């Protein structure tokens, strides 16, 4: 066991950076060679291994491994029984379909017959899609981070038959290199330790399991007050970490800080501090200018490997584009900068065009690789562009988008826009409008040409939580921009989730693919969908969405609430075969489920007047108060919920026919303002459901229409302004209250 422990020192080197695709150079070359050998042959029929058990799965990631010579099992009783019966350790490999280094490890090791023979003889091998089973991923990611100080994907862990981890890491090359032990030699050492030093292994596993249980048994730190100090402190920390040249916070790699920008926009509105707004704007501008953004097809890649947002890790994730689409809409409302609206619309249109199932729900991700090369689908040479556009247009396009003969990525060019369109147009003797018109036509031509390339793989499974985030983004975009296509897409997706992704008792399911929905939903699925349905209600005033949100909230409390009053567990009691029942307030690539639950509870409390909703929200915030006070940047989405809790509640009651022109003018006036704390409700006096709506939302009651015209009542801090019937009057009230 001592040899295994000594390996930890070698393994604990930037695992997360490998999972993030930070390592290029030799590793990139090895990936290309692997792609030219085993994987290419398997996919083109020169040699095809027989299918293993994963062929019965629906996950695209698991199906990618269905012809590996490794005797893979999915996570479940069959694998656990085999490990117990044969007294073998479990080799657990966790990844996801769009994970670049997961593909590398598959090509180098899992398609290697000699490696597979070792795994099949000495281990029970389990493959997990982290997007299907985030509960399993969270537990063993925590374990690996405790062992090594970092983590990432592919995640590699070795477990006892009773699922206790005793060793782990991330990517392992087939032979010793990059300062990492080779996978084949590691397997031999693990097998030897299991055979000859079993007592040491068991003791190590028991200690690690105890540490995991202690780390996840939090009852929350309630020793800090819920006040503006944490909100202000976050601004100070962000100022210190801000990259004033390129935007973002900290060093490369840079991930899109969507929640941070949302916070900065709110803080700037509250304090009128131009430095705070500048941090948001510089970051938004630089992300949209660089290669992080897909200038032809719209949408954002996962993150930038450099400080300039130039070279992305090329995978595209649904949740990133949901968060960024939403925050660019907010930035447009907060600043009036039309460019932010354009980026938001192009991002959401990308999802509608390329990531939407025929049933209306949204797919999970697109891969970084095509034809064995990362980014090949997205990069260009001047000759390629000239061939499609002709020399005159190509000269303009390549100059504006920075395409050169030398290139900026492995001899080719990632499109970027480092000069503002207005400045570029003036230098070329044309108007900005004319430049944009010409470029739009060129982009359309090149997008069509790009569509004929071999596209990256698409993970077409539907995840409830991620769909909730995109439904929110689309609903918010419809509300702000009055674009019907966004409303239609949001409602169709919501209808799909509520009708196709529930069990026979009405509970949400996590995954849908190939006509089949499965796996009990997690906290994130319930919280993100409950909040999304509130966004849909605010955007459409269709009471169906409010009813569905309340129903999901009731189910969520029943299934996930900690009866000690300290927030929600990530898993329900229906999730079996887990070492721990985790509860977390930290954000990851996704908002924490507790933060979104707190936000949804606060919104429901305002709409319905329910003290129960308010109390639960405050209990969650109280449990996170220590983190909010000491580490606000680690819980930015909880900070947004706290901001919502602390800011004055602005209720806007609308009385009248929602389809009447005078009501549309009132709505237009409201939706043109950046009012992140508002809650709207509408009552139509001519509707048969008027009495029940007034009962559901008490502050709608006893508020008449004035002179038969659409009427708005604005209340803040339990004090109401005089009702108004014109857009100008309403605009004056909103702008006055927004400045207070």
Image: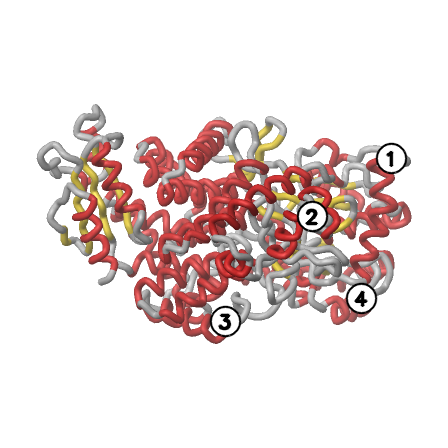
- Kindly report the distance in space between the C-alpha atoms of the residues bearing marks 2 and 4: 45 Å
Residue 152 in which image quadrant: bottom right
- Kindly report the distance in space between the C-alpha atoms of the residues bearing marks 2 and 3: 41 Å
- Kindly report the distance in space between the C-alpha atoms of the residues bearing marks 3 and 1: 51 Å
Q: Is residue 60 visible?
A: yes
**Residue at the spot 40% in from the left edge and 55% down from the top edge:** 337
Tell me the mark number nearer the camera, choosing from 3 and 1. Answer: 3
**Residue at the spot 84% in from the left edge and 45% down from the top edge:** 111
Do residues under tags 4 and 3 come within 8 Å of each other at their CB atoms? no
Question: Sequence order check: which comes first, mark 1 or mark 4?
Answer: 1
Relative horizontal placement of residue 15, taking residue 349 as reference (left or right): right
Q: Which secondary structure lies at badge 1?
A: loop
Relative horizontal placement of residue 736, taking residue 573 as reference (left or right): left
Question: Sequence order check: which comes first, mark 2 or mark 3?
Answer: 3
Q: Nearer the viewer, residue 133 or 560?
A: 133
Name the residue tied to disc 4: 178
Tell me the mark number nearer the camera, choosing from 2 and 3. Answer: 2
Q: Residue furthest top?
A: 688
Tell me the mark number nearer the camera, choosing from 1 and 2. Answer: 2
Q: Which secondary structure lies at badge 2?
A: helix
Name the residue tied to disc 3: 242
**Residue at the spot 62% in from the left edge and 64% down from the top edge:** 253
């Amino acid at each position: 066991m001592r040899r295994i422990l000594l390996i930890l020192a070698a393994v604990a080197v930037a695992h997360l950076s490998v999972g993030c695709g930070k390592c290029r150079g030799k590793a990139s070359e090895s990936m290309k060679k692997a792609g030219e050998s085993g994987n290419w042959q398997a996919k083109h029929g020169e040699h095809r291994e027989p299918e293993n058990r994963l062929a019965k799965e629906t996950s695209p990631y698991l199906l990618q491994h269905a012809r590996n010579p490794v005797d893979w099992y999915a996570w479940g009783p069959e694998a656990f029984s085999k490990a117990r019966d044969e007294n073998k350790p479990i080799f657990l490999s966790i990844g996801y379909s769009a994970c670049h280094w997961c593909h590398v490890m598959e090509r180098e090791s899992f398609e290697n017959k000699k490696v597979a023979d070792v795994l099949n003889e000495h281990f029970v091998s389990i493959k997990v899609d982290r997007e299907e089973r985030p509960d399993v991923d969270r537990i063993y990611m925590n374990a690996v981070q405790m062992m090594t100080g970092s983590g990432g994907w592919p995640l590699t862990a070795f477990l006892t038959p009773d699922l206790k981890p005793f060793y782990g890491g991330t990517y392992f090359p087939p032979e010793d290199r990059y300062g990492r032990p080779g996978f084949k030699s590691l397997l031999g050492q693990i097998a030897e330790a299991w055979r000859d030093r079993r007592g040491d292994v068991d003791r190590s596993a028991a200690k690690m399991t105890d540490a995991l249980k202690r780390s996840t048994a939090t009852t929350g730190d309630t020793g800090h007050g819920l006040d503006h100090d944490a909100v202000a402190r976050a601004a100070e920390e962000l100022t210190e970490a801000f990259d004033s040249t390129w935007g973002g916070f900290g060093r490369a790699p840079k991930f899109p800080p969507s929640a941070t920008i949302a916070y900065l926009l709110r803080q700037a509105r509250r304090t009128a501090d131009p430095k705070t707004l500048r941090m948001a704007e510089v970051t938004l501008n630089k992300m949209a200018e660089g290669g992080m953004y897909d200038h032809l097809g719209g949408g954002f890649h996962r993150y930038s490997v450099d400080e300039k947002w130039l070279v992305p890790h090329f995978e595209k994730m649904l949740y990133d584009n949901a968060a960024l689409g939403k925050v660019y809409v907010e930035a447009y409302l907060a600043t009036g900068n039309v460019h932010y609206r354009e980026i938001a619309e192009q991002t959401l249109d990308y999802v509608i065009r390329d990531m939407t199932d025929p049933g209306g729900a949204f797919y999970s991700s697109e891969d970084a690789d095509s034809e064995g090369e990362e980014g090949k689908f997205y990069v260009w040479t001047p000759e390629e562009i000239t061939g499609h556009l002709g020399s005159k247009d190509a000269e303009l396009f390549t100059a504006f988008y920075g395409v050169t003969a030398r290139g900026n990525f492995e001899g080719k060019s990632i499109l970027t826009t480092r000069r503002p369109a207005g400045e570029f147009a003036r230098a070329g003797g044309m108007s900005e409008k004319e430049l944009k018109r010409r470029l739009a036509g060129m982009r359309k031509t090149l997008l069509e040409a790009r569509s004929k390339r071999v596209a990256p793989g698409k993970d077409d499974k539907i995840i409830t939580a991620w769909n909730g985030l995109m439904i929110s983004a689309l609903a918010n975009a419809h509300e702000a921009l009055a674009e019907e296509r966004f409303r239609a897409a949001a409602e169709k997706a919501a209808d799909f989730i509520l009708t196709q992704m529930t069990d026979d008792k009405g509970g949400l399911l996590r995954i849908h693919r190939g006509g089949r929905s499965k796996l009990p939903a997690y906290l994130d699925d319930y919280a993100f969908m409950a909040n999304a349905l509130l966004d849909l209600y605010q955007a459409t005033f269709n009471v169906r969405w409010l009813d569905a949100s309340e129903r999901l909230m009731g189910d969520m409390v029943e299934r996930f609430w900690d009866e000690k009053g300290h927030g929600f567990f990530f898993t329900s009691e229906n999730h079996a075969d887990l070492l721990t029942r985790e509860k977390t307030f930290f954000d990851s690539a996704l908002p924490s489920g507790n933060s979104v639950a707190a936000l949804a509870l606060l919104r429901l409390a305002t709409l319905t007047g329910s003290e129960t909703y308010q109390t639960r929200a405050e209990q969650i915030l109280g449990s996170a108060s220590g983190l909010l006070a000491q580490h606000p940047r680690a819980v930015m989405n909880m900070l947004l919920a706290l901001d919502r809790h602390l800011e004055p509640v602005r209720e806007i009651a609308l009385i009248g026919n929602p389809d009447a022109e005078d009501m549309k003018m009132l709505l237009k006036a409201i939706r043109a303002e950046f009012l992140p704390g508002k809650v709207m409700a509408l009552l139509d006096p001519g509707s048969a459901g008027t009495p029940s709506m007034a009962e559901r939302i008490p502050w709608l009651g006893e508020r008449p229409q004035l002179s038969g015209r659409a009427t708005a009542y604005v209340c803040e801090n339990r004090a109401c302004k005089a009702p108004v019937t014109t857009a100008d009057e309403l605009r004056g009230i909103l702008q006055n209250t927004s400045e207070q």
